[in-house]
Image: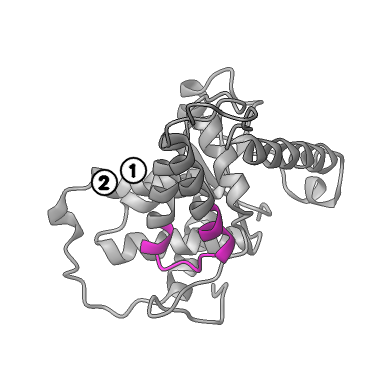
Amino acid sequence: MNYMDNEQNLNYAIKLDIFEGPLDLLLYLIKKNEIDIYNIPIALITEQYLDYLKMIKALNLDLAGEYLVMAATLIHIKSRLLLPPPEEPEEEEEDPRAELVRQLLEHKTFKEIAENLGSRPLLERDVFTRAVFPPEEREKNQGDEDELVEASVFELIEAFHRVISQLDKKELLEIDLEKLSLTDIINEVMDQLAVTKSVTFEDLLKGKKDRRRIIYTFLAILELIKLRMIKAYQTSVFGVIRIFPAVES
């Protein structure tokens, strides 16, 4: 079955609208590192933030300018914190992180309000059926079945990076000269889900035989999430990611 008509290739940046913004990435990093939002270790967060930007750019994804502005802001805050305090300050200076903390708290509040509104019974809830795990997965995640959490794009990027880093370098040699298109890979993913109903994110990527196919498969997953044709869920925060069709066939 052909699910997509428009082909794309990696010769130009692929624009994805599922990247919510730099504040979302910062909140993700704060949550991941279990950091007190009122006492952010700027050096650590700046380093991890820049690492994520490198991963996004390496995938040739279109990076919004606001991400670069936030990177510059983090570096500026870091440099201010490294400066020695004045010997005789005329007045107590505000913590250089204060404005960033205010922005994060405000964004977090609006995000939580939006999520609460989104949890109300709506059309999407009527369309998307409750995810069902295969028997072996249910046993492995017993007790978590009712706590499905939708995976963020940042978690998908990190999972992708883990898959790539775990593979033997010999496996990443691009010996396959066949012509690939994002359209073909999207169709392959949807055809697989039509049969299996769900698949783990890692199994979906590791089933590919070279770097190009792995990258194309990851981009296909991002594109399908953007188009709301598939959904990515975890049994818990930072847990195993499983991919499901958005509408059960």
Q: Position of residue 73 (x, y in %)?
A: 53, 50
| Mark linked to residue 165 | 2
Between 124 and 130, the one lying in front of the other is 124
Q: Position of residue 24 (x, y in %)?
A: 61, 45
- Left/right of residue 236 with respect to residue 12 in the rendered view: right
Amino acid type at mark 1: Arg
Between 19 and 131, the one lying in front of the other is 19
The residue shown at (51%, 65%) is 63
The residue shown at (68%, 54%) is 247
Residue annotated with mark 1: 162
Q: CA distance from mark 2 to mark 1?
A: 5 Å
Q: Position of residue 87 (x, y in %)?
A: 48, 27
Is 64 included in the stretch rendered in magenta? yes
Span colored in magenta = 56-70
- State yes or no: discs 2 and 1 in contact (Cβ < 8 Å): yes
Amino acid type at mark 2: Ser
- Left/right of residue 125 with respect to residue 74 in the rendered view: right
